[in-house]
Amino acid sequence: MKPQPTNPERRDFLKTAGALGAVTAFPGIISAQTVTNAIKVGLIGCGGRGSGAASQAMNADDYAELTALADIDQANIDKCLASLKRIPKTGDKVKVDTSKQYLGLDAYQKVLDSGIDLVLLATPPGFRPTHLAASVAAGKHIFCEKPISTDAPGVRWVLESAEKAKQKNLALVAGFCWRYNNMIQETFQQMQDGAIGRMVAYYATYYTNPVKPMPPASAKPAGMSDVEWQIRNWYNFVWLCGDSLVEQAVHSVDKIAWAMHDEAPVSCVGVGGRAIPAEGGNIFDHFEINYLYPNGVRAFMANRQSEGCYNENSDYIIGTDGVCTIGRGPKPRIEGKTNWAYSGQQYNMYQREHDLLFASVRKNQPLNDGKRMATSTMLALMGRMAAYTGQQVTWDQAMNSQEKLFPEKLDWSGSLEVRPRAQPGITKLV
């Protein structure tokens, strides 16, 4: 079954890009008939998500080549290369000489200067605004993992970079993978066509286990700097990950934004905190955010990271004529005046975002997800601000926040004080 794009941006792209042929109708490798030269790919951030993105990039194009890598740790690079070389049809495309394996906080620039055409940005999200700006300045096509910043100044910078990418005719695809899931695209299209009537509320859950628990201070090796320790345990520090709502549950926040046509909410309130003690880090392990939209629609985002608790990753979209449920069962369904369940083939959304990225580069019709990836990230940041402060936060307050979490200067061997964990009612909105 041919996927049905639901948002105008995707619909318009597929309508004008019919020449992309099979890749728009079915995910897979771009036909060699469209190839004139190899696309050289660089990877910045060689962890699990980066390695996965590199594999998908190699599968997206017959003539893609991985030629440069950057990370803070040679062990990560070695593991990444070993895993890629074991994959059939991918290993032969890995052409990374030892001279193009770069280490350190400045390694990203060395990858950009190495002769690549397209870069995969997969470091902790605190680095994303800097890496994205440098990638656009270097004239590279970009796959940018979510979220795109850990603070509002970074979001504003990303919006500037996205506009520059558009002016330079550079592709910019975000790692908000649900937007590329044809099953969810069709589901959202059903709702946009009136299957649930007028939407009145959206409730999303992201209840899961802890992602990367903070090790005790005693586990820190002697002589290791604060900066290195925090980056190696990046998920536990707000300046690096943005907190659990922003780094992980942002996928569900993105679906809320999508359902609201990427329009900004009026305001939000939120609660959150840390139920499980953690030595050294400063993130919350649970949030509940209530967003108010101009038309009176409410959206609720609940996430928790805790062991031994009920887990769920679902969406409940409530309308005047029915309810759409995603995640409670293998396929989305609508119940009410219209009864519907998705019955088509589900594509691999992680692969599809790369298929369409490379296809857009080949056809010189570059995708640009810049504005919506910034909106979704800002929506999560706004919720974090409300929960951290205990205050009602408006969209304008969030967008204009001057709180800059990412350090101005970062020294791998330097000291870096950990900000106290936020205290609602005491922590101020900046």
Image: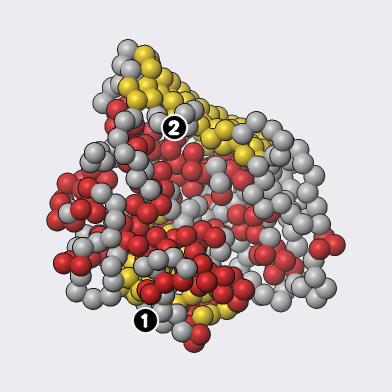
Which of the pair 199/338 is nearer the observer? 338
Furthest-bottom residue in this view: 99
Q: Which numbered marker is on residue 115?
A: 1
Residue type at mark 1: give it: Gly
Which of the pair 89/400 is nearer the observer? 89
Seen in the picture, residue 241 relative to 285 is either above or below; the reply is below
Residue type at mark 2: give it: Pro
Front tag of 1 and 2? 2
Q: Which residue is mark 2?
A: 330
Residue 330 spot, x, y in % from top left = 44, 32
The colour style of the image is: secondary structure
In percent of the image, x 41 and y 19: which residue is there? 323
Residue 367 spot, x, y in % from top left = 29, 56
Q: Secondary structure at mark 1?
A: loop
Give the side of residue 161 with respect to residue 401, left or right.
left
Residue 146 spot, x, y in % from top left = 48, 53
Seen in the picture, residue 296 relative to 156 is either above or below; the reply is above
